[in-house]
Structures are given as structure tokens and as C-alpha cells.
Amino acid sequence: MLDAADFQHAFGTMLASPDPSNDPAMRRALAVHRNTASKAARDALFANYPVTAAMVGEEAFAACATSYIEAVPPREARLCLYGDRFGPFVDAWTPFAEAPYLGPVAMLERNVTEALFAADRPPLDAAALSRGIDPEAPLHWHPATRIAKALMPAASLWLAHQPDAPPDALDAIAWDREIILVTRPSDAVEVRVIDGPTRAFLAGKTLAEAAANASSEGGDVASTFALLLSAGAFAEDIPRGE
Amino acid sequence: MIMTAGLGFKLEHLDEALTARNPGLWFEVHAENYMVDGGPRLRALVALAERFAISLHGVGLSLASVEPPAEDHLRRLRALADLIRPAAISDHLAWQKWEGAHHSDFLPFPRTRQALDITAGNVARVQDALGRTIMVENPSLYIDLPGHELDEATFLSELARRTGCGLLVDVNNIFVSAANLRFSPEVRLDAIPASIIGEVHLAGHRPDPDPDSGLLIDSHDAPVSDPVWLLYQRLIDRVGPRPTLIERDDEMPPFQDLMLERDRAHRLLEQRMSIDA
């Protein structure tokens, strides 16, 4: 009897090796299984990195994606979350060396994917504020909230590739580093560039600390807080232990 | 509401799906696409589930793997099932996990008695974790492996007898496997006991783009072919009506085109029901 573990080891080894079998029927079958899995993973990367793909074109993206899939194959079945290390891979991909903004854009797209599938929590909004907020109570980020620092204008590039972007969005980009806030206030993920005081506000563990942080960097506390509330950056305070 | 013919759900079809009023319509999703913490995609499925029966079709349980299903995968599937309250949960008679990697396709294995023990153990683990039975689907086969001790129908029947699981008969997979392994699809189809069939899948296939291969690929990127419709008619003539899904995962046509295929299956099921009535 062919032991199941031995078979799966042998078949898995053949799938992973480039020239696996002398039997033409086995070679054809392995090619089908390899292509199907590779296509599924590649489709997932196209879906999860649409702006990066649009910026480099389908062929160049597919080449990079195929190489990534060989280097970092999926570890689990949820391909909607596949590609957590693709950003740094794009950054280091030699054919993209002339376009150093691609890595930062891809890294931002990973934040967008994470934000898209993060847990639901009621955002802290103006209505919640009107019920009163203790300045010394913990200030919680919404589960979707992400902050990124990019040496390139990754957020501006990402925004310029959205369907609602103005036609001159690409030309209007100031080629500078950006602090980027990613949030999900409702059904859509939002990406925006924020300033230093706003980032300092977000680092506060309480409202009082957040206000002090922003103020010490010269920020206007009220407008900073209003911006972050409208972005849905914070979650309503829910007792821990859920 | 009786489930007749359903459609694989795609997020881009949400608005049209929510307003569809076709009798017997239901939807199936790949469970893994929704096994996430939250967000708009999960909310869309919740909205769909308020209107329609939903089937959660897994592509990642790796039921024939020598390693058991991952605990966190089972926990997430259970959480999704508790949220959606699906009419059915299913996955494939295949394996995908190997040395920590997940191979996103349905890999074959010799149908030995040992493999049956392993698969039955995995199905039982899944069913224990979910607190309900699942259905197991026959995969598309691309090679006639040596070492089989049981034919596919016997393997699946025995799996159903041991675990109480049902069978999801993918008619296109039988057609594709029969072409690739050179057996009669009619004989294979007729061997499946009616009593364990809980759902039917219909999908499109195409020839392998590699001209030297000669294989048919279960590509889900084309309409259901005429010979598959004929096999389907043969199946329901014998076993009676079963909830039937039109699967399409690639080269997506407009929702209304998919609904035409779905309505064709619905009419065949209605005709079959009128014979029983």
C-alpha cells in the first residue's frame, strides 16, 4: 500500500521542483496543478495591489508577482489576505529599481487591505463626543486604523489612481515624504496625508495626552481632533475583554 | 422556500443579487473570502443572507491531508457559519496543505483504505467543530494515479457512511476527469448513490492552453458546456431534484447572463419536480 504521508511528501516535492518527473502524464498533471495554484495566488496579488499593478502594467506586475509566489507561497487558504510581504518584495525587485516609489505604494496597499478586512467597531464620532468624553480615559484606535511613513508620496500616488481622482492629480504631486493615515469610517477605506501634529495626536494614549502631543508640535488641537473623528480613526470605548 | 438553482456570488454583483426575485434562487460563496474579522465584504454577505439561502463552499479544509484541519481555520469557519447560518457547508475531496504551504488547488491522492481513514477523521473533526454535517465534493482529476484501492464512488459512499457527511456532485468535474483519465462519465455518475447527494455543481471548462497536454481544465471561466448539461439531466432524472449551483469564477459575464444559465438549471429542476408531484 502507498502510504498517504509518503505520497503527499513525494507529490508536494514534485510540485515544488522545476523538472519533477520523467512520466509525461505526471508532468502534465503537475503543470496543471502548479498553474492553477499560481494563477489563484497571482489573481490575489492583482486584487490586493491594484494601484501597483496599474502603475507598472499587467506584464511587469505578473512577473514580479510570479517571483513573489515562488519566494513566499501562500501559507493559508484566505487568499484575500495573501501578500503581506509583497511591499518590501516590490521595493527590492530589480526591474523596478528606476521607480523607487513602487515599494512605498505597495506597502500602503497592504495597509489598505488590512484596513478593509479589520474588525467592525463603532467609530468615535461627534455624537459620541456629545455624550461626553473623559480626557483621561483611554483613546482607542479603530481596528482599521493604520499609520505609515513613506519616503515617497505613496498616498498621493495611491489617491491619484482612484476612480474619483481629478485628471491633474498625478501632475500635482509634490515629490516629498508623507505621513499617511488609513481608516475605514464606513464601507470604504480612506487614505490621507497627515501632518506631524496629527500623527502626534494619534500617539496619545488619552485625549489629554493626544491634545498635549499635538499642541507641543504646534498643531491646532480642535481641528486635528475634528479631522480624526471624521476620518473614523478612533473607536468608541468598549470595555476590554470582549 | 425550496432551493432550486443557485449562483456563485461575486461582490461586484451585490446590488443585482439583492434585487433578484427568481423563485428558488440561492447563492454560494467561497468561505475563505469571508473568514475575516469584519468590513464591507462581510457585511455584504450578511445582507445577502437576510434575503437568500447561502451555501459556504470551502476551498481550504484540505480534507484528504495527512495533517488535520488547522484549528484557527475551523474556528473562523465556525464563526462565519454562526453569523451567516448557511443552508449548507462544503469542501473538496482533496488536499492542499504541505509543509506549511497552502497549494490553492485540489490535489489528487491514491484512494487507499488508509486515505479513507484519514479523510473520515478530518471530516469528523470539521463536523465536530461546526456542530453540523458538511458535504464533500468530487474534484477534477488530471492524472490516473497508481495505487487506488477504492473507486471514487465507493470512497465517497464509505466516507458518507462513516461520517454522516453528504456528497456534492460536481458534474463538470466528472466530465473533465472522465476526459482526462479516459473513463465513461455516465458510468461514474450512475455509480453515486442518490441518497447521499445533497448538492450539484455545474461549471465550464476549457482545453489546456498547452497544446501538447491534451487535458481539459476545470477553469470555471466559461458557460456550462452542452455535454455537462446532458449529464446533469441524466443525474436528476435518476436521483431527483437537488439544489444546483452555476459556478463561475473567471472571465465574469454580466449578472444577467449568469442568471440565464441559472434559470436553465431551475427549469430542469422544476420539470423534474413536476414528475415527482
Image (cartoon, rainbow, N blue to C red):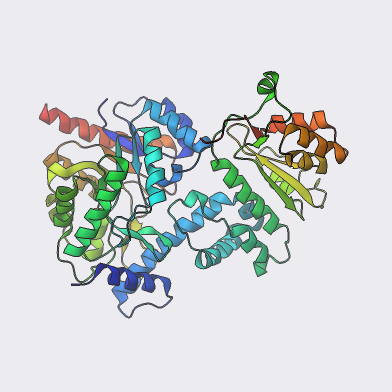
Q: Is residue A131 above or below residue B40?
A: above
Camera sees residue B17: no
Of all residues, the one furthest to the right in this rendering is A218
Frontmost residue, B159 versus A199: A199
Residue A159 shown left or right of residue A57 in the figure: right
Q: How many marks?
A: 0
Q: Residue B112: x and y, percent?
A: 18, 65
The quadrant of the picture occupied by the N terminus of chain A is bottom left
Camera sees residue B67: yes
Residue A179 shown left or right of residue B32 in the figure: right
- Residue at image location 64% in from the left, 54% down from the top: A106
Of all residues, the one furthest to the top in this rendering is A131
Frontmost residue, B217 versus A238: A238
Q: Is residue B81 above or below residue B18?
A: below
Q: Residue A198: x and y, percent?
A: 78, 39
Q: Residue B70: x and y, percent?
A: 38, 54
The image quarter in which residue B212 lies? bottom left
- Residue at image location 58% in from the left, 46% down from the top: A114
Residue A39 shown left or right of residue B272 in the figure: right
- Residue at image location 40% in from the left, 33% down from the top: B83
Q: Is residue A89 above or below residue B120?
A: below
The image quarter in which residue B8 lies? top left
The image quarter in which residue B69 lies? bottom left
Of all residues, the one furthest to the bottom in this rendering is A22
Frontmost residue, B9 versus B184: B9
Residue B64 shown left or right of residue A152 in the figure: left
- Residue at image location 74% in from the left, 28% down from the top: A135
Q: Residue B205: x and y, percent?
A: 33, 54
